């Protein structure tokens, strides 16, 4: 997969094993992005009022096709936390209500829920998921141990951040529906990473990032909501879309996508991302990346003396592997790996534990993981408390 590296702008001197945090944009997509920005500066009015909105529709429809939903149920937002905030703020949570979630969620989302729950006197319940997980069924069971008569909403990641594992979102949604609950899924890591069909998944709300595994420019994400919910969602920012002079026919779109002047060029590049993925047979590329993750997992498990967090198969793992390490200073370890070994990889403090998570994409090869292995081995051999 070495030749694919030429298609990215990434610094060739760096072994890049952190695609999961912010993705990386291939050259043709970045060029398309810059072309839109040039259009904007050359003729701001035409961009803002005509060409931009036209392409925005093309882009939104292409994205809806790709993630498996009606375009009318989907809109662009800058990032998943933004999308989630639109929904949480409008949920009309009452004192005593409970939101059932897990202790594997992303920090910004935890904070969003905690903020609005504490404002409304509701509880955000971070149900413990026993690690290592043994099966999808165990995860579903662990989540729903937290179910009570007060539960109104279920919120889970489809792929978790610090622990990098796939959660059985479809099974969790099905169970949530059986219990008569609203089901909200954080799919930040999903599009472009594992197959996604939002309609089949059955969530009421789904938010995802295009600027991670779909490789869009930063600031390109989406919010999906069912029609029944859309009408309950007041805008976070009230702007021209409220009482729109030119209603689009969708309050959902008008309220949340038209929030004032901004450069929305990143949104316009989804068709370019999809073309890039098609041209380079990205499904195959992704399969190879997943195979490399599974193949290299055992040697890191052995080196770090740390069990896999899930069974080693593609039901539970995609293009990331996270392992718990014994490390007294995560920031210093991450800095050392970058400064001395030129390896970009996150070392993540999470729930009184520390995880190291590598991501594999088309431009990575097994030699990147060999470099990581040797670096960790060396740091470990030095006997520092940084890595034991
Ligand atoms: C699981 C998960 N949810 C949500 C997000 C979105 O973060 P943000 O909204 O800050 O882009 C991330 C980003 O890494 C994530 O890993």
Image: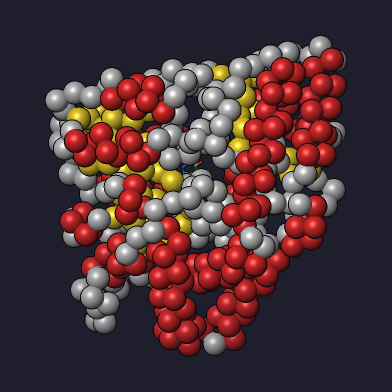
Q: Where is residue 327 in the image (x, y as percent from the top left)?
A: 67, 18
Q: Where is residue 64 in the image (x, y as percent from the top left)?
A: 40, 64
Residue 77 visible, this angle? no
| Residue that appears at 75% across and 57% down | 4
> Relative to 369, is 72 above or below?
below
| Residue that appears at 62% across and 24% down | 323
Residue 184 visible, this angle? yes
Identify the image quadrant of residue 233: bottom left
Question: Left or right: where does residue 210 sit relative to residue 285?
Answer: left
Q: Which of 2 and 252 is in front in this view?
A: 2
| Residue that appears at 76% across and 52% down | 1
| Residue that appears at 68% across and 70% down | 28
Question: Left or right: where does residue 5 sit relative to residue 197?
Answer: right
Q: Which of 302 and 281 is in front in this view?
A: 281
Identify the image quadrant of residue 170: top left
Figure quadrant of the C terminus: top right
> Relative to 365, is 221 above or below?
below
Question: Left or right: where does residue 259 sit relative to residue 297?
Answer: left
Q: Where is residue 121 in the image (x, y as percent from the top left)?
A: 20, 31
Q: Which of 120 and 274 is in front in this view?
A: 274
Identify the image quadrant of residue 259: bottom left
């Amino acid at each position: 997969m070495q030749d694919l590296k030429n298609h990215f702008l990434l610094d060739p001197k760096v072994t890049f094993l952190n695609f999961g945090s912010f993705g990386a944009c291939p050259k043709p997509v970045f060029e398309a992005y810059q072309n839109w920005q040039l259009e904007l500066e050359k003729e701001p009015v035409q961009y803002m009022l005509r060409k931009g909105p036209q392409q925005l529709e093309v882009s939104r429809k292409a994205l809806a096709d790709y993630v498996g939903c009606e375009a009318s149920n989907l809109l662009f937002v800058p990032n998943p936390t933004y999308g989630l905030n639109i929904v949480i703020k409008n949920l009309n949570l009452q004192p005593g209500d409970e939101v059932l979630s897990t202790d594997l969620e992303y920090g910004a989302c935890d904070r969003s829920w905690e903020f609005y729950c504490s404002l409304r006197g509701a509880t955000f319940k971070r149900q413990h998921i026993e690690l290592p997980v043994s099966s999808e069924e165990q995860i579903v069971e662990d989540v729903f141990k937290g179910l009570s008569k007060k539960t109104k909403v279920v919120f889970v990641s489809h792929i978790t951040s610090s622990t990098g594992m796939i959660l059985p979102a479809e099974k969790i949604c099905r169970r949530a529906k059986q219990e008569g609950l609203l089901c909200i899924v954080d799919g930040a890591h999903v599009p472009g990473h594992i197959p996604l069909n939002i309609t089949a998944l059955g969530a009421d709300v789904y938010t995802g990032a295009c600027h991670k595994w779909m490789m869009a420019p930063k600031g390109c994400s989406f919010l999906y909501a069912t029609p029944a919910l859309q009408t309950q969602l007041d805008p976070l920012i009230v702007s021209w879309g409220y009482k729109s002079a030119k209603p689009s026919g969708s309050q959902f779109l008008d309220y949340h996508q038209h929030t004032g002047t901004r450069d929305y060029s990143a949104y316009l590049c989804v068709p370019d991302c999809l073309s890039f993925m098609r041209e380079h047979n990205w499904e195959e590329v992704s399969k190879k990346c997943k195979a490399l993750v599974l193949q290299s997992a055992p040697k890191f498990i052995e080196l770090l003396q740390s069990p896999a967090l899930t069974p080693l198969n593609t039901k539970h793992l995609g293009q990331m592997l996270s392992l718990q390490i014994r490390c007294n200073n995560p920031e210093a370890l991450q800095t050392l790996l970058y400064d001395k070994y030129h390896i970009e990889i996150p070392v993540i403090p999470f729930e009184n534990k520390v995880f190291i998570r590598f991501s594999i994409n088309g431009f990575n090869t097994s030699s990147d993981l060999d470099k990581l292995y040797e670096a960790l081995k060396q740091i470990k051999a030095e006997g520092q408390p940084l890595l034991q």
